[in-house]
Amino acid sequence: DGGITQSPKYLFRKEGQNVTLSCEQNLNHDAMYWYRQDPGQGLRLIYYSQIVNDFQKGDIAEGYSVSREKKESFPLTVTSAQKNPTAFYLCASSIDGVHTGELFFGEGSRLTVL
Amino acid sequence: SQQGEEDPQALSIQEGENATMNCSYKTSINNLQWYRQNSGRGLVHLILIRSNEREKHSGRLRVTLDTSKKSSSLLITASRAADTASYFCATAGSGNTGKLIFGQGTTLQVKP
């Protein structure tokens, strides 16, 4: 089935460690996005990529990094510079890079800093 | 910057009743979308309404858009226990940036 796969579903990290969250899509979508969700909150945009080998900062990019070497993959690294990384991370994709159309989401990765 | 604001924050109803959620926004939009999120899961797209549309239906869902009041509502008719979830509106701003901005959501509980 076509869709977006995020892994791992749960991840625990010690302070000072970098962690990488995986996001893979087989929908042949051009654009991919990373959002952060805190309890009881809406989604905040971290990074987005409208095309391979290009990506843009969202509203809360500090402490995060991404790459887009392949159309189907958009991994997110949470670095030690991110002050409060414990959150639910959601990856999404859309057919084009206009960022106004329907988003397709993965099931999320929950990161907990110990 | 948060564009959409939803109310109520939480809603509890009995199965069979209708549920209405509202979303207000501040700037002009290209479209407004509603998403559903079951606890601990990803979001699922429900419906998109463009700025030149006033009402849209999809199954038991009815969405209205009033651009003069900068507001939208989502009505779920004849609710079921399986409709229990959080519902988010997301606005796509007009203009070149056109980023999709999510509200904080309404948590709906439907009691059997």
Image (tube, grey):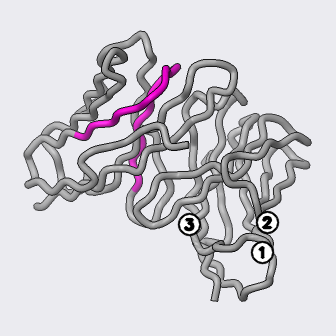
- In the image, what residue type sits under mark 3? Phe
Residue bounds of the magenta highlight: B21-37
As drawn, B13 above or below A12: above
For label 1, the SS is: strand
- In the image, what residue type sits under mark 1? Val
For label 2, the SS is: strand
Q: CA distance from mark 1 to mark 2?
A: 6 Å
Q: Earlier in the sequence, mark 2 or mark 3?
A: 2
Q: Earlier in the sequence, mark 3 or mark 1?
A: 1
Look at mark 1 in the image and give the residue it sits on: A19
Look at mark 3 in the image and give the residue it sits on: A88
In depth, the one of A77 and A59 nearer the eye is A59
In depth, the one of A103 and A88 nearer the eye is A88
Q: Position of residue B62 (x, y in %)?
A: 25, 28
Q: Position of residue B90 (x, y in %)?
A: 47, 37
Look at mark 2 in the image and give the residue it sits on: A77
As drawn, A42 above or below A97: below
Within the magenta stretch, is there residue B26?
Answer: yes
Q: Are marks 1 and 2 in contact (CB under 8 Å)?
A: yes
Q: Residue furthest top?
A: B52
Q: How many badges with numbers are in the image?
A: 3
Q: Residue at x 29, y 56 (%)?
A: B107
- In the image, what residue type sits under mark 2? Thr
In depth, the one of A96 and A49 nearer the eye is A49
